[in-house]
Structure formats: C-alpha cells, structure tokens
C-alpha cells in the first residue's frame, strides 16, 4: 500500500502561513531534500485553496509530471489534464482506493482544513516537517481541529546549516486493550 506523506514547511511556532497568508519566510537557499523526495512520489493530494493558489501563481507547472487529486465539494472543473477532483462524500474510501493503486508515495501537499479531515480519519501515514528557524507569531496553524491524541515515532532528523531542521515521523499503531485475545493479566 502506498503511503500518504505530509511534507510541509512550518515555523517553529507551528504556522504554515503568516498572518496575511504569506509564505515568503520559507527558506529556498538549498534543496533541503526536495529532489530526493520528489523522486519518491508520483501523486499529490491538495485542497481547493492550495490548487487555486498553485494555478493562479503558475506554480502548478512544477507538478505536471505527477497525478494531482483536488479535494473539494465546490470546485466544478479543473484546467489541467493530470488533475482530478474528489468530493468529500466518500473521503476514506476514495483515499484508500488511491493508496491501493500501484505507484509511489503520495504527497499531502496542502490544505490545513483538509489535513484535519485526513487526521480525523487516520489517512496520513508519515510526517516530513521542515521546521524553519522563525517565529511568525500568528497565521494559519498546521494542526487545526485535532481532537484525538496521535502518537508518533521520530525516524529521522536532518539539521541544515541554515538552521532548518527536517523531522520525519511515522504514526505508531493504536494500542487497544480490548482487542488483545487470550491475554492473561
């Protein structure tokens, strides 16, 4: 089964956008492992707002070699051949069907509210967070509306000379005492 990997830049105080939606604080002075990561994926999951931002800025051309799924209940059509719209009615089934297809890993690219839905349904398998050495003091928080505890295991830490630190986490399986058959306590 393919993995869904959340790979995002985040400020030290947990924001993915500044107070005015800006992301000019993201360090771009080196590759930060993006080339290697790009080689490991062939699909992107994005929310409507992220898709519209990529389209309006022309940055969508950077993603033309990957299949892109836009999750939206309001977007009626897309302008690109490699893009498909998925409505939220069957989120878990649709995502699991894509995860079960042949292919590389899937990049969860953007959408804080979409991320909340993915987290609530256990659809993110791995977190690759590039922690930038900046405190924004406000903006859009990475994790919003998270209502359940989620245990993670740190599997990799990569510090860079710029002060950026990349952290890779995997989900730990949920432990349920009720599902242990024949346990003698």
Image: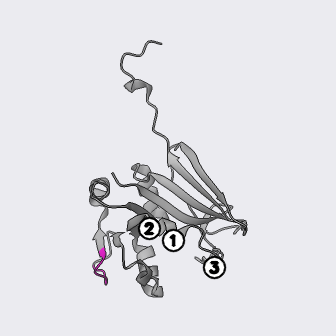
Q: Which residue is mark 2?
A: 39
> Spatial distance from mark 3 to mark 1, Cα to Cα?
20 Å
Residues packed near mark 2 inside 10 Å, few (<14), some (14 to 19) or many (20 plus) = few
Q: Report whether residue 175 is seen.
A: yes
Query: Which numbered disc covers residue 35?
Result: 1
Please, what secondary structure does the residue beneath circle 3 have? loop
Residue 69 falls left or right of residue 157: left
Marks 3 and 2, the one that precedes in the sequence: 3
Which of pointers 3 and 1 indicates the residue nearer the eye? 1
Asked if residue 164 lies left or right of residue 152, the reply is right
CA gap, disc 1 and disc 2: 6 Å
Q: Which residues are magenta?
A: 77-83
In this figure, which colouring scheme has been used for the structure? one colour
* Secondary-structure class at tag 1: helix
Position of 164 with respect to 177 (left or right) is right
For the point 72% across and 69% down, the residue is: 162
Query: Residue 93, percent across and down?
Result: 27, 54
On residue 134, the disc is none
Give the residue at mark 3: 24
What secondary structure predominates along the stretch shown in magenta? loop
Front residue of this view, candidates 4 and 47: 4
**In front of the other: label 3 or label 2?**
2
């Amino acid at each position: 089964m393919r993995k869904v990997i959340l790979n995002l830049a985040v400020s030290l105080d947990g924001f993915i956008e500044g107070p005015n939606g800006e992301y000019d604080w993201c360090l771009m002075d080196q590759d930060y492992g993006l080339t290697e990561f790009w080689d490991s994926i062939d699909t992107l999951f994005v929310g409507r707002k992220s898709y519209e931002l990529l389209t309006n800025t022309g940055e969508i051309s950077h993603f033309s070699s990957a299949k892109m799924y836009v999750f939206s209940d309001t977007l009626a059509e897309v302008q690109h051949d490699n893009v498909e719209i998925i409505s939220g009615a069957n989120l878990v089934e649709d995502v699991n069907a894509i995860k079960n297809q042949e292919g590389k890993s899937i990049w969860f690219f953007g959408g804080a509210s979409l991320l909340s839905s993915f987290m609530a349904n256990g659809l993110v398998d791995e977190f690759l967070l590039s922690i930038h050495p900046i405190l924004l003091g406000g903006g859009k928080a990475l994790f919003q509306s998270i209502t359940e505890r989620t245990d993670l295991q740190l599997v990799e830490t990569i510090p860079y000379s710029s002060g950026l630190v990349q952290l890779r986490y995997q989900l730990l399986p949920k432990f349920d005492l009720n599902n242990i058959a024949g346990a003698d306590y």
